[in-house]
Image: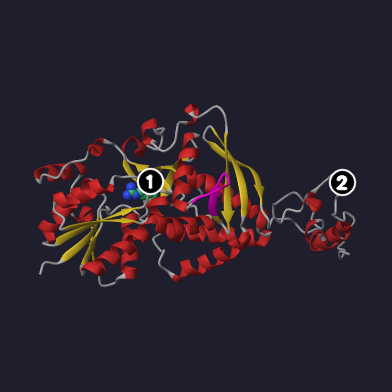
Amino acid sequence: MTDKVVLAYSGGLDTSAAIRWLQEKYNVDVIAVTIDVGNEKDFSVVRQKALKVGAVKAVVVDAKKSFVDHFIFPALAANAVYEGVYLLATALSRPLMAKLLVDVAIKEGASFIAHGCTGKGNDQVRFEVSINALAPDIKIIAPAREWGMTRQETIKYAQRHGIPVPVTVASPYSIDENLWGKSVECGVLEDPWTEPPEDAYSWTKSPAKAPNKPGYVEIGFKEGVPVSLDGKELDGVTLLLRLNELAGEHGVGRIDHIENRLVGIKSREIYEAPAATVLLQAHQALEAMTLAKDQARFKQKVSIEYADLIYNGLWFTRFHQDLAAYVLSTQRFVTGVVRTKLFKGHSSVVGRKSPFSLYNLGLATYDKGDKFDQKASVGFIHIWGLPVRNQAQVQLLAQEECPLSLAAPKAKSKGKRKAAK
Ligand code: ARG
C-alpha cells in the first residue's frame, strides 16, 4: 500500500508544487489539509486546486473558533508581544495547525506530515517542534527546504507540471495572515532604509487618508476576554473581524520592525494588526485598573516569557501551562469596559470602568470628599526613609565628593558618622 503524507496546503505556489514533488520524490499519496484561521480565502477554490494538482484527498478545517478561544485570547490575556511590537499572529497559528495536521495524519494512517516552510524561518521550527511533541512517530518532510529551487525555478517546475501559477506570484511580497494580524516580507522591504510602499498594506488605510474625525469604540471584557463592542455582545471571531475593519479604517496597527528570528537571522517585518493593537492597549488599561501593583509587575515578566515561548515554538510545554495558570489566575477581576479613540493611525485609551476597579476616588481626589489621611504620611515617610538616611550617613555624606557624584569615593579622614534615627 502506498504511504500517505498529510500536507499543510495553502494553495500557493510552493505547497502546490510540493504536491507533485512529494509524489515524485517520495512516491506517496498526498492528503492536502488547509486550515482556515481567518485568512479570508475562498477555501473551496483552494480545495479544488489541491485535487486538480494531484492530491488524493483535500480537507479544509475551519479552525477560527479554536484559534480565537485557545490561542489568540489566551495570548491577549498574557499581553504576549514579541520584542515589544510583534503581536505573534503567525507564531500563534502554527501550534494549532500542527495539532490539526497530526489529527488528520492519525485518522488517515499517514506516516508523514509535510509543510511548505523554508529552512530560514521560524515556522519550520514551530511546526516541527509541535508535531514532534504531539506525535513523535510521524516523520516530517519539508519540500521547500529540501528541493533547493529558487522562486523562478519553482515557477518553472510548476509550469512544467501543469500546476496553475497564481497571479499573486507577481506580488513581490511574502504574506501570511489570520484573524490576529498580517505579516509582509520580501521585495523592497528587505532594504531596512526603504519606507514600506502603500501596496505593502492592505488591512489598514494610510493614516494620511484616514477619516478626519476620530472614531470611538467601547470594548467590553469579561475576565480578561473581549466579549463586546459598543455594548453589543459578539463571539470572538466576529469581534475580531469587526475590530480589524474599524481600526484598519483609521489606519491603526501598522508595525515596521527588525526582528530577531529564532534561527539567528535579523529580518525586516511589516505587520498589520489593527484589532490586536487596540485590544492589547484596552486589555492593559483594564489591568492597570484592576490588578494590584505587584501582580501587574510580576505579570510583565510573565508576558515576556509567554511571548518568547510562543515565538520560539514551545507552545506544547509544561512551562507554557505553568505560565498560563498564572495568567488565568490574574484575569479573575479583569472585567469592565474600555473606551478607545481611533484617529489617523493612532489608538488611545480615553476611558475605562470596572465593577472591580481598585481606583478609589475618595483616596485619589484633590477635591472635597478626600478620605486619605494626609497626616499619616509623615510616619510613613519616616519609616520608608529610614534605611536611606542610615546609608546616607555612613556611606554618602561621609565622603568628600558631592553626593551626586557616581565616581568611586575617597573616604573622609575623620568623617563623623552618626547612626540614623
Ligand atoms: N516573522 C513572523 C514570525 O516569525 C512572521 C512570519 C511570517 N511567515 C510566513 N511564512 N510568511 O512569526
Q: How packed is label 2: few (under 14 Cα within 10 Å), some, or many (20 or more)?
A: few
- Could you say where residue 342 lies in the image, as x and y percent from the top left? 55, 37
The amino acid pointed to by label 2 is Lys
Look at mark 1 in the image and give the residue it sits on: 267
Q: How many marks?
A: 2
Q: Earlier in the sequence, mark 2 or mark 1?
A: 1
Asked if the magenta segment contains residue 231, the reply would be yes
Residue 205 horizontal side relative to residue 212, left or right = left
Q: Residue at x 15, y 58 (%)?
A: 56
Q: Which residues are magenta?
A: 226-234
- Could you say where residue 218 lies in the image, as x and y percent from the top left? 59, 44
Residue 125 horizontal side relative to residue 44, left or right = right
Q: How packed is label 1: few (under 14 Cα within 10 Å), some, or many (20 or more)?
A: some
Asked if the magenta segment contains residue 186, the reply would be no
> Which quadrant would the C terminus be assigned to in this image?
bottom right
Numbered disc in front, either 2 or 1: 2
Does mark 2 have its CB less than 8 Å from ligand 1?
A: no
Kind of element beneath mark 2: loop
Instruction: Residue at the far bottom: name it.
Output: 137
- Could you say where residue 207 lies in the image, as x and y percent from the top left? 49, 31
Rendered view: 95 above or below 269 = below
Q: Residue at x 90, y 56 (%)?
A: 375
Kind of element beneath mark 1: strand
Camera-nearest residue between 11 and 184? 11
> Which quadrant would the N terminus be assigned to in this image?
bottom left
Camera-nearest residue between 26 and 349? 349
The amino acid pointed to by label 1 is Ser
Residue 355 horizontal side relative to residue 265, left or right = right
- Distance between the Cα atoms at labels 2 and 1? 56 Å
Does mark 1 have its CB less than 8 Å from ligand 1?
A: yes
